[in-house]
Amino acid sequence: MTVANDLRLDETALREFRSVFAGQIIRPGDDPYEEQRRVWNGAIDRHPAVIARCAGVADVVAALSYGRATGLMAAVRSGGHSFPGQSVCDGGIVIDLGPMKGIRVDPEGRTARAQAGVLLGDLDRETQAFGLGVPAGIVTHTGLAGLTLGGGVGWLMRKYGLTIDQLLAVDLVTADGEFVKASADQNPDLFWGVRGGGGNFGIVTEFEFRLNPVGPTVLAGPIMWPIEKAPEVLRFYRDWIEDAPDELTTIVVNRKAPPLPAIPQEIHGKPVVVVACCYAGSVESGEREIAPLRKFGTPLLDLCSPKPFVMHQAMFDPSFPRGWWYYFRSCDVARLSDEVIDTTVEHCMHIESPLSGCPIFHLGGRVARVGENETAFSGRAAGHTFNINGITTGEDGFDEERDWARRLWTALEPHHTSVYVNFLMDEGEDRIRQAYGPKKYERLTELKKRYDPDNFFRLNQNIPSD
Ligand SMILES: Cc1cc2nc3c(=O)[nH]c(=O)nc-3n(C[C@H](O)[C@H](O)[C@H](O)COP(=O)(O)OP(=O)(O)OC[C@H]3O[C@@H](n4cnc5c(N)ncnc54)[C@H](O)[C@@H]3O)c2cc1C
């Protein structure tokens, strides 16, 4: 018997809730319950008492007020991609904005409005129809909402900044059910907080972004060498990116080559070092910029070519499907020093699982030029963000992969600077403090006292109100 099945909900309150709710209310035993209680990370197995699939803002307000009235623990879900599964809970209510998928692009004004249930691929599809885009993440099925509220790193960040750097405004329902807007002009303090402070201050129902020209054809893709060459490749890479233009964003990945159709069979399962590139400018200038990298050593494979941006965006999708078991450790480092490179390579040579790996995002460019205090996001000055992932298809072997990820993270500890809040697991208050630094943490606490004094929104990288 699960916690949720055990829980007796007040039937009168539930009836009243149903009478004002336009979306779908799902309870244990209902047909879609098993599917809907699941989130992206298959290692998370929780049983909420109620899943409220919201059709619009009125439903969000109704679900929130039902949650408050009944004292149920509330989880807020949009794309369901939280690494530690913070968008689902045992015995509480999931306020699910997934069905809210409206997008409106204004190509002349170069803005887009997107509701909270939009996934990154949905937004790219609509904006790319006009050759425009929002800088966001690297996997199309990630939720726009959670990603944006934490900051948003991805392929376009060195040119256009983090996702929050192109955010113009949000609509938000506060803990007491009030509908407010936040932008540079309206509730600017709240606008500062939602740009990096996560879901601590309310439920965002809609985002408005500035759009910028992107592609639609970009020079992009992975270049691969055997892992034995990684010490030289990464030293060359480190020096080469020193002068990289903002148009070029790269992500290094150390892993075993996945069995994808684009990769020759004889490489499948071989440990490799990959530099994945995305040049957000003309293909011709991209060819010039990327030439030194592709000439370095003898790459096993070079799949960096002109392609639609939306195709490049989907490149990592097969590596992170829904339902596998995932464990992450993350940190920022100032630069890829010899020690950082050697430690990383040494550990990546011993990856067991064909699925685990170590993506390293190159920051800088526009990310670093936005003032550190302009948004709640922290760590703009970092050189690189590590996202070490231990992955298995199910429970078998998961503990070993998790331990591998922990070992690499620990070995890198002398080099840690900050950490990106969206790449944290459930790691406790000290790590959240570390993610924001003492001054921002204090400012976020003050904001929390104003917008959520009872800490109703606590299933997140939590900023407590006291
Ligand atoms: C496969 C994969 C790839 C990723 N790639 C990237 C990447 O390239 N760049 C990057 O920056 N991040 C990336 N991430 C991390 C990602 O930013 C976070 O996992 C983010 O939380 C996902 O948002 P979501 O809406 O899908 O999450 P959910 O699990 O739905 O929500 C996560 C948390 O966000 C808050 N939240 C969600 N929706 C709302 C809302 N509408 N209002 C208020 N609070 C809300 C809640 O606190 C919730 O617990 C990736 C994650 C995955 C799983």
Image: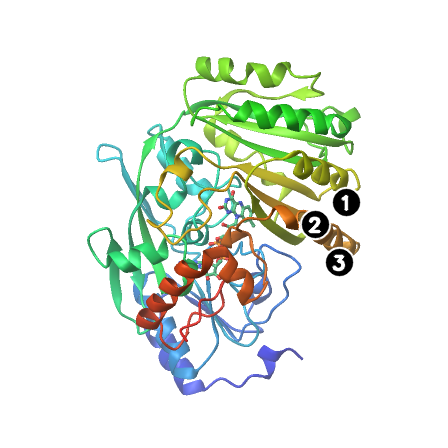
**What's the residue type where badge 2 is placed?**
Gly
Q: Is residue 44 left or right of residue 152?
A: right
**What's the residue type where badge 1 is placed?**
Ser
Q: Residue at x 44, y 71 (%)?
A: 464
User: Rounded to the nearest whole Å, what is the CA distance between mark 3 and mark 1?
Assistant: 12 Å
Q: Is residue 207 left or right of residue 80?
A: left
Q: Earlier in the sequence, mark 3 or mark 2?
A: 2
User: Rounded to the nearest whole Å, what is the CA distance between mark 2 and mark 1?
Assistant: 8 Å
Q: Is disc 1 placed on a helix, strand or loop?
A: loop
Judge by depth and name the residue closer to the eye, 176 or 192.
192
- On the image, the x and y values in percent for residue 261 come to 68, 28
Judge by depth and name the residue closer to the eye, 95 or 337.
337
Residue underneath mark 1: 353
Q: Is residue 262 visible?
A: no
Q: Is the CB of mark 3 within 8 Å of ligand 1?
A: no
Residue 12: name its quadrant. Answer: bottom left
For residue 390, which numbered disc appears in the image?
2
Q: Residue at x 42, y 27 (%)?
A: 246
- The 10 Å Cα crowd at callout 1, few under 14, some 14 to 19, many 20 or more, is some
Residue underneath mark 3: 395
